[in-house]
Image (cartoon, rainbow, N blue to C red):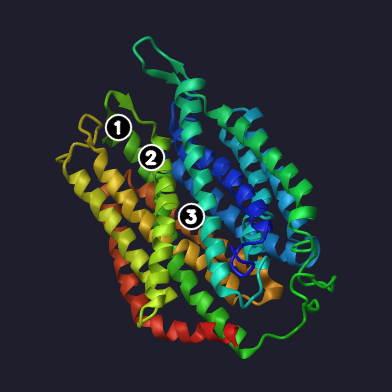
Amino acid sequence: MSEKTKHPIGLWLVNISIALQSYCGYAFSSVFILFLTADVSANGLGLSVAKASAIIGLYTGVNYMGSIIGGWITDNYLGIQKSLILGSFLTAAGYLTLFFVNPSVAGIWTGLCVLIVAGMFFKGQISNLVGSLYHQDDLTRKDAAYALFYMAINIGSFFGPIFSGLIADKWFAEVSASGEILSYGYRYIFLMSAIVMVIVGLFIAFMSPKWLGEVGKYPANRMNKASKSEGKKAKSEHQPLTKIEKNRIVAMGVLFVFVVLFWAAWFQTQTSFSILMNDLVNRNVGGFIVPVPWLVSFNAILCVTLSPVLANLWLKLERDGKGDLSIPTKMALGMLLTASAFVVLIIGLNTLGGVLDGSAKMSILFVLIAYLLLTVGELCISPIGMAMFNKLAPVRYGSLAMGAWYLSNFFANLISGKLAGLTESMGYGEVFATISGVLLVFAVLLFILRKKLVGLMALDEFKK
């Protein structure tokens, strides 16, 4: 591999760290709704689906909102490297708190508050670090780097639910002689995640000097040493925005709205999907009852498998005469695919004939097909949008811009939590139909706006 095509070694640090962080995050999120709604006698909190969904929506939303504050602190005072180390150890502290506190709503919120503070210093920063490893005009390698970054996320999110399912349902569960689970080992998932995040913090602290060097070492908005890899002088935080930069920010703002709607639908995988799969899906495969968290892992392995397929498809389109699809077009396609995933689930629910007390079960194939469509939709939106925010944001606001990308998840989770709670009163079919209809309308709108948005992005200016 030539010097022009190979990636810097710092990408290894980024991908290893995000894979382990994602492992912990998905191990936690894949069972959290089950932990909150399980009976107290089964080591759960015994909450209703509506209350548990509201807690998850508020926690996850505020967690992502903190990325804006953390991004500002990082850009002005800490720098990316210190933020990542701080975020890792705070995350470990949050999981430890969840492990040790009394199983109550107040106790759980104590641990969640620590995780919220921790999230301020990790998600946006490590995403921005990917782009910081490359020249601003190195668009092709940056796209490839974000594709690898997204694959690393999904490698972690594949293994996290696998092990959390084993810990909760097998290794630390109390099982009757007939094979029925009497109590679950949810708390030990928190302990495992804490240990892994301590390892992540130590790994970043010890390897950053060698693998990152000056990249991300200093706050972007303060005068600092010139980067040896960039060979450019550091810029002042007071440098005014150009007209092109302002137009790009407008484009980011418009696409932000569409991303919120996509994630509001996608985050049903952490709430209503889990309850649906636990209660109304036949998970018996060859005599083995598939743990609910394992179905979350199915999404992750699809991401890892399909990411290079789509990446090659975009490259093939780029080599053709008409060129690659624009960013807004890809996102519109992603929203259409996501809408179709909910249609598949509605079809599956209709096979139950209105029997929703758990005595009838829908085929697991409907869930697998829905996840396939969701995954392709996700790959048309998430890694592409993440790379876009890094490209379009002014360099001096890099971490803040990635915080804004994750801020979309704040609004999405609040909406998603409300939608999941409505499944108790409205039913899955009506809620899923509403989600599908809204996504379809906004996908068409985004396709109509695509040319205007491409003009505002002015990506060709990077090549001049």
- Gap between marks 3 and 2 measured at Cα: 20 Å
Sequence-wise first label, 3 or 2: 2
Residue 188 locus on image (x, y percent): 58, 27
Q: Residue 424's image quarter? A: top left
Report helix, strand or loop for mark 2.
helix
The one of 15 and 241 positioned closer to us in this rendering: 15
**Point 74% across, 55% down: residue:** 211
* Quarter of the figure that contains the N terminus: bottom right
SS class, disc 1:
loop
Is there a contact, CB below 8 Å, between mark 3 and mark 2?
no
Nearer the camera: disc 3 or disc 2: 2
Label 2 and label 1: CA atoms lie apart by 10 Å
* Crowd class of label 2 (few under 14; some 14 to 19; many from 20; radius 10 Å): many
Spatial CA span between label 3 and label 1: 27 Å
Using the rendered image of the protein, determine whether residue 80 is visible from the camera's viewpoint: yes
- Mark 1, residue position: 283
- Residue under the image location 74 percent in, 58 percent down: 212
- Identify the disc placed on residue 295: 2
Residue 172 x, y percent position in the rendering: 52, 21
- Point out the residue furthest to the left here: 353
Image location of residue 199, percent across then percent down: 70, 39
